[in-house]
Image (spheres, grey):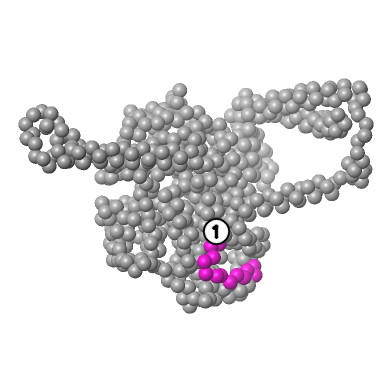
Amino acid sequence: MSLLSVKNLNCSQNIKVLFENATFAIDNNDKVAIIGQNGSGKTTLLSQLVKSAQTSNTQIAVKKGLRITYLPQKITFDPKNTITDHLFGSNTPAAKAISKYQKCLHKFNEDTSNEAELALTLATEEMDHVNAWEYEARVNSILRELDITYLSQKMKELSGGMQKKIALAQAFFEETDILILDEPTNHLDITTIEWLEGMLIRQNSAVIMVTHDRYFLEKVCTKILEIDQQKLFIYKGNYQTYLEQRDARYASQQKQEQSIQSVLRVELAWLKRGPKARSTKQKARKQRIDGLLSRDKASTEDSISLNTTYRRLGKKVLDLKKICKSYDNQTIIKDFSHSFQKGERIGIIGANGAGKTTLLNLMAEKIEPDSGFVDVGTNTVFGYFDQHSQVFDLNMSIHKHVCQIGTQITCHDGTTISAAKLLEQFLFPSGMLKTPIGKLSGGERRRLHLVCLLLKNPNFLLFDEPTNDLDILTLSVLEDFLMSFAGCVIIISHDRYFMDRIVGQLFVFKDNGKVDPFIGNYTDHVYKCKTQQSLSNKKQAASQVTPDQKKAKQEPQKRKLTHREKQELSSLEKEIDTLESEKEKLSSVFSSSTSTPEDYEATGKRLGKIDQQLKKNLARWETLAELS
């Protein structure tokens, strides 16, 4: 039985139809992505699915007792709460028990009175009662993997990236049937995104997500739901499979449209001859023609044309000389220098909080360095697309806002187009131009912000997480534009596909404010790091080899196994298999809901002995195997 099934679901927003007759099912272990243009209804569909587990819906059927965990785009929290308060703020018995236990433990560490000891004892018994020790172990493991350590910090003091990491950790704590994630990679650094990929691949529950990260879609997804042309299309497979199947669908639609056009030419010629529409057949024929003319035409993907003018750069573009910047006695950037050249496309990578945005702000002269200087060329005009959408007058219409920048745009070939036409090229059709900006989705506002930025004709583009909230179509065309852009482009992005396609070099943030240049894209950098790590591991292993071991390796083994050694080798193989089987069975104790703390302790001791014996047996087996 499916966990959740949707049949003929319709959804509208104000007078706009988002999609109609959506029908699909979610099964165990499905990894589903919902994709589509900004404003097509992706987030709305997620919210409908979340509500279905709480309230009855005739169009959405759910399995009885279905558990849904939902991570929205925007993280909500009480500013007074610490990380601990937020993490264990759920109403589950385990979360409540852990929260109480940690508070009692903290109090007991400061006050060892009988009253504090009794409170800790009762809290410990409650932990035993609800079997919260395994839950706490899982929580601590996830927190370590995400490098979340200072749990007493206030949530309001954290960066957007750290808040998102904490929300992700919380989402993985609870056991669930369907995990629903809306843009989970936004504001995360690349290391955390790769961690999230691994977690979702291993996740036992079904996963439904909205994301624009194409590498993420490729590695994680087993099914893709696309909202297109106010309909929902289902594709089995990952992102590459989706592209192939979608192209086949478009080709089929085009062939069907050509067939309809051929029929229409014949039918319209018949109408022009003016036959008398007296018979039932003639009237039916006229109705059929009217139906063909008024049909909803199946169109392929809309296109965006970023065909703006180009402001030339001067000989000097931008020079950074020994830039230093610190905050609260912490060095963010130290002695960084670079002379930018026309046509450079550079990506900036590093952990959250490393100083990437600070570097962009220094380049744009939004802040001043502590030492060193920034020398901006006379003809250099920055266009800064930051993490937050432009502040709009929400009551103003799309068209009126753009007309404040200009009523027409001059293209690089000298031709002009109206603001309305340009908006249409950016997927704001004529029917939307009078729409108040306040009614646009977050992604649509980001797209409008991008239009307004490019219309100002900059020649040095600074992008801080430009892929947040932009749909895949907009990203793809933005990539094409940036590839042909003659000015400079500097990008901070967690979108590895975007970085791989655009940049030719990197600024890599290291510890203590050091920024290293690297020639190549993100994948090149990862390959180099892995290669260096592999060589380092081999050197370390080689340095630990004793002279006797080196001599043994250099001396060729001339003898063969004796009969007794052959028997020993066979016996070792059987014993190793037995130990590994026992180890696998014992490991299940930690995931069993019936295991007790005593079980964990006994199992841990036995696993330690098994590991020691396996290590000894494998070492002996390798020695004998080399002789066989």
The amino acid marked with disc number 1 is Val
Query: Which quadrant: the C terminus?
Result: top right
- Percent across and percent down for residue 578 are 76, 23
Residue sitting at 66 percent across and 59 percent down? 511
In which image quadrant can residue 368 be found?
Answer: bottom right
Left/right of residue 123 with respect to residue 545 in the rendered view: left
Where residue 442 sits in the image (x, y, percent)?
39, 51
The residue pinned by badge 1 equals: 503
How far from the left and from the top, in percent, is residue 176?
Answer: 51, 32
For the point 37% across and 54% down, the residue is: 304
Left or right relative to 89: residue 585: right
In the rendered view, tell whether residue 542 sits above or below residue 393: above
Q: Write the start and end of the magenta stretch as one range.
A: 334-347
At mark 1, the secondary structure is: loop
Question: Magenta stretch mostly in which secondary structure?
Answer: strand
Along the horizontal axis of the image, is 117 left or right of 222? right
Residue lying at 40% horizontally and 28% vertically, measured from the top left: 5
User: Magenta span has 341?
Assistant: yes
Q: Residue at x 75, y 50 (%)?
A: 535
Q: Is residue 21 above or below residue 42?
A: above
Asked whether the viewer can see residue 370, the reply is no
Of residues 269 and 294, the one nearer the viewer is 269
